[in-house]
Every structure is written in C-alpha cells, then in structure tokens.
Amino acid sequence: MRMTTSWKSVIAAAALSCASLVYAQSPVTVRVGVQSIPPDAVFQAKDWLGPYGLKADIQEFSSGGDMMQAFIAGKLDIADGGSGRLVTMAATQPELFYIMAVRQSGGDRYGLMVPVKSTAKSIQDLKGKKIGTVSGSGSNSTFRLFLEKNGLAEKDFQMVNMKVQDMQSALQQGLLDAAIAWEPQVAIAETAGAAKRIISMKGVNESPNFYLVSRKFADANPEAVAKFLAAAWEEAELIRTNSAEAGRLAAGFISKKGVQADPKAMALALSRINVNPEIKDEMVQELVPVAESMLAANRIKTMPDFNKVVNKKFYEASIKYRKK
C-alpha cells in the first residue's frame, strides 16, 4: 500500500515531536567540584541529583585552590570556595560567578587538639609551645581571630606550617604540642584515640564556604541550578537530622577509594558542621573584614561589591522543587 503525502507528513511530525520530547527530558549535566570534606563525601555516596532530572559530573580536587582554578578556567559549573579565594575572585573577576548558597559553615568544625596524655586544658597552657597549622586555611584564619579575642597572637606560640593529614602522627610522635585542624581530621584523631580536642572554635565566627555557580551556566540553566540546590537542601537535611546515617554513607564512599574510614568518626565530624544552604546577610558580612585585611595587605586592589555577586533567586526558586 502506497503512503499518501498527508500520512507521511503526520508520521514525520509525530517523529519530530517524540524527538523533541526525548531531548527535553534528557538530564542536564552539572559539572560539580568537590573536596575531601565530610559533606562532599556524603554528596558523592548517593545520586542526589538524579531524582531532580540532573546528571552529576563530579570532579574531585585535593585543595580549594585547585578547584577555584578549574572553576575560573570554565571546567566547572559549580564549586565551593573559602573566604580568601572568594574575595580575590569578587575583586578581580566578579562577572564570572554568582554566590548562590552556603556549602558549610560554623566554627565548631575547627578544633584545637593535643596528645591524649597532654595536661593542657586551655590556650594559656600552650603559650610558647609548638602548634601545627595549615597556613592560609580557614582553620588558621579562625584560630588567629580566636587568639585576638583572648589577647594573644601567633607570635606567642611556635607555629608550624604543615599538611593537615600529618598532624595526627606528629602529635603521637611528640613533634607537636597541639594542632589546629578542620573536620574530619579532628574527629578521626579523637575516635582513633590519638588526640583529644580541648578547644572548639565555635562562636568565634561562621567561616562560611559558599556555593559558587558560573554565571554563564546559571543564566542558561536557571531551573537546573534551582534543582541542584533542592538536592543540596535534601542532603543537608539528612546530615542535620541523622548524622549517623550520613556518617555511614560518607565512610562507605571513602572506603570504596581504598581508605578505611570509621562511620562513627564521620558522624562526629558531620555533627560539628553547619550545612544549611540558605544565604544569610551575616554570612556575607563575614567576607567584609577578610576583604579589608586583603586590601590593606595589597593582595587585592579594590574593595569588592558583594551585592553584585550574591544571587539569592536560585535558592528561593529551589523551595518549590523541595516541596515536590
């Protein structure tokens, strides 16, 4: 039977319609940068984006600096950055990104730990002693602020710049009298019986890490960005309400990489981290003194206008997807 021209047109139109539908339903791929921090381990342990119609292209970095370089080079759509690097970008390349949410915050994720047998109970007990730190890190900046609030300065101690992963063994070998580190390193050392935390930086500052999104990607895919934040909110809810389950997920993911991780240590670490994605004005305000200090030290040439890079519309749009 010969097919008439009209039927050919109908079939062609139907095929085109189906192709368009498939294309429309294809998941948007989001290139996400992660680091070796507990919330990022939870993020990688489960497909949080799939239920929102997104596909994650996860790229892991050994440091925030490496991640920011990849972000600036256009190799990532979403990354999270600490205050120092973020201020530099806001001062020099504000047109590249939006600050759209908070990844993690809270001073409690920074802790001063000492050997198990140490008799030190306060910062005064450590004057003149060797304290390990990672220069330029959020823990180091928060610790300096803690010292200022207690009438002290780094010069009152023997500060030793070192890698955070070397601190536990240095404490055990007696090479350090104390160390200031971030989670999960503190919780891991505590759970292993290698050190004890005597001071938390809780209340010193919030030291937020912000989610950054490429303006090019966000402007082209606003719905995908909102859905990503809905998934981030869902992950944050698990961490806040069930740190034991979140710790199990994180430990399971880390163990798959060939590194043994204690679920109890990961749960303890996660219980000390604030993962509320909502951007609050006081969080953004914490960037101001950092920028002022960098400006005074000639590390940046102009004071950033953070109002031009903060964009809350994606988080607000994510609320309707969370309800669904």
Image (tube, rainbow, N blue to C red):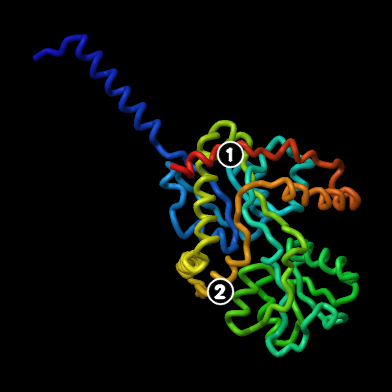
| Residue 321 screen position, x and y as percent | 48, 41
The amino acid pointed to by label 2 is: Ala
Residue to which mark 1 is pinned: 316
The tag on residue 9 is none
Above/below status of 142 relative to 47:
below
Q: Secondary structure at mark 1?
A: helix
Give the percent coordinates (x, y) of residue 169: 66, 81
Q: Please state which of residues 308 and 245 is positioned toward the viewer in this rendering.
A: 245
Residue 267, position in %: x, y?
Answer: 54, 70
Q: Name above or below for residue 69 compared with residue 176.
A: above
**Relative to 43, 216 lies left or right:** right
Name the mark on residue 265: 2
C-alpha gap between disc 1 and disc 2: 34 Å
Q: Amino acid at mark 1?
A: Glu
User: What quarter of the picture does the N terminus occupy?
Assistant: top left
Within-10-Å neighbours for mark 1: few <14, some 14–19, many 20+: some
Judge whether 176 appears above or below 315 on screen.
below
The quadrant of the rendering that contains the C terminus is: top left
Give the left or right position of residue 115, taking residue 296 as reference: left
Q: Nearer the viewer, residue 63 or 197?
A: 197
Q: Is residue 6 left or right of residue 161?
A: left
- Give the tally of numbered discs: 2
Tell me the crowding category of disc 2: few under 14, some 14 to 19, or many 20 or more residues within 10 angstroms, Cα based: many
